[in-house]
Amino acid sequence: MILDSNYGPFQTLVSAVGSLTATVAAIALGFRKRASWEPSEQDVESGPQRVGSLLAAVAISILWTQFRDSSHAGELSRWAIVLAAGCTMFLLAYGFLIGTQTYQIQQTSVGGPTRRNVIGGFALTDKAKREADEQHLTIQQVLERFNYDCDRVWPRSSRSLAKLLTVVFYLGLTVCGTAALACASILVSTFLAASPNPNPIPPPAGTPPNTVHFNRTFHFTQPSFNISAPTPPNFGGFTSLERDASLKGRVKVIKIRMLVEATSRSSVGFGDLWAFLGPQKFTGKQSQRPFPVGAATWGDIITYPWDLVNDDAPTQVKLACGRPQDQPMPTTATWSVTFDFTTHNPSAEPYLGCSRKSSINDPMFLDNGLYAQLYLWTGFPGANIDIGNIQMQVEGVYVANDAE
C-alpha cells in the first residue's frame, strides 16, 4: 500500500480540527442544560457531566498526541471500532435504565405544581411492596399514594445503586462517543494523506537540480513474522514488495524513516534493518530469485543473512540496531529508525543504538515507479522478536540528468 504525502499540511489540519471539534463537544456536554431524557439535576447532581467532559477531553488529548501519526492507523481503527461499540452498548444500557427506573414526582411551587423526574431504586420498601401487591398498583401509583416521598417507596441504598449505575452508563456513553469521534477525525486525516496524486507534476524544463522534492510513505502488507538467533533457521524475514507508481523520472533519495512494530519474547535485541529502493523488483545475487516475503530461511536466499547481496537497488542501506545489555528490550514497542543519505548518519528511538554497515545512493531513473522492500534479521544470541506492522517514509528530489 502506498501513501502519497502531498496532502501533509491538510492531514494535520483535518486531524486537529476534528479532534478540536470533539474536545469542544465534550466540554460543551459538561456545561449545557440537561436534555429531557436525562434525570433531573436535583436527583443526580451535575458533577458526572463535568467529570465526563473532563475524561473525554483527556482521552482526546491522548489520542491526538500518541496516535495521529499514520503508522498507528491500524491501531487507531481498532480503537475507533471498540469505542464506537462501547458507546452503543452504554447507550442501550443507559436507555434501558432510564426507561425502567425513571419516575415522576410532583412538587408545589409559587407558580403551581410542577413535575420532575427522579430515579427509582431496584427494590421497594416492605410497606411499598405490600401496598403495590394488595392494591395491584404500579410503582408510579405507589409513589403517588406515598405523597411522592421517595424514601418511603425505595430504600436509600437501592436508589443509590440505581443512581450509581446511571452515572457509570452516562460516563461510558459520553466518553466513548467523543473519543470515537476523535479517532474518526484522525483516521480521516490519514485517508486524505493516503489519496495519491494520479497526475504527479514533473519538474518543469530548466528547473535547477535538487529543488523539486517528493515524499512518499510505503505501508508493507506482509504477515507478521519472527526473527531469532542463533541462526539458522529462523534468522529473519522480508517485508512485502511495494511500488509507488506515481513517481516518474530521475530521482535521488535523501532520507528514509522506518517504523517497525516489534514484540520481544526475550530481553535481547534488536538486529539488522536493511532497506532496498529501486526502479525494479529485487533479486538475491546468491539465489538469483526475487526476495521472498515474510519469514525467510537459508534455503530461500541460499546464503547467510550477513552475506546477502543485491545488485538491483541503486539506493540501499544496511543498519545494525541494538540496545546495551544493561537495557533489556521492552516487551512491545514501535521503533523509529532514520537514515540520512546526505550525512550518512543513522538515528533510532526509543533508546536504540544504531550504526551503518554500508550504504549506496545513486540517482535512479523511474519509468515504472519506485519499488521498496525491507529485510530484517538478527544475530543476537537469544533474540526472539515478533515483527508486526512496518512502514517506511521516503524523502527525495527530482534531479537533472547531469546531477549527482
Image (cartoon, helix red, strand yellow):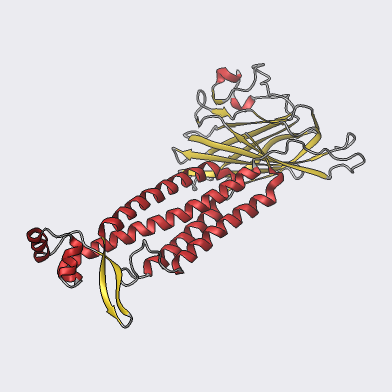
Location of residue 75 in the rendering, given as x and y in whole percent from the top left corner: 50, 43
**Dividing the picture into quarters, in which one does residue 341 lie?**
top right
In-image side of 242 versus 145 (left or right) = right
Q: Residue at x 88, y 34 (%)?
A: 401
Would you place residue 295 above or below residue 327 in this image?
above
State which quarter of the image contains the C terminus.
top right
Q: Is residue 399 above or below residue 292?
A: below
Residue 164 placement (x, y as % from top left):
28, 62
In the image, farthest residue toward the right: 206
Label total for image: 0
In the rendered image, is residue 154 in sight? no
Q: Is residue 299 left or right of residue 199?
A: left
Quadrant in the picture for the N terminus: top right
Q: Residue furthest bottom?
A: 110
Image location of residue 375, percent across then percent down: 61, 30
Q: Residue at x 29, y 56 (%)?
A: 99
Nearest the eye: 305 or 126: 126
Using the image as rendered, state which of residue 149 and residue 241 is in the foreground. 149
Q: Quadrant of residue 105?
A: bottom left
Instruction: Please name the residue shown 32% across and 68% down the image.
Output: 44
Residue toward you, 134 or 312: 134
Picture coordinates of residue 37, whole percent (x, y): 36, 61
Residue 241 visible in the snapshot: yes
- The answer to whether residue 51 is above or below residue 396 is below
Depicted 46 relative to depicted 93: above or below: below
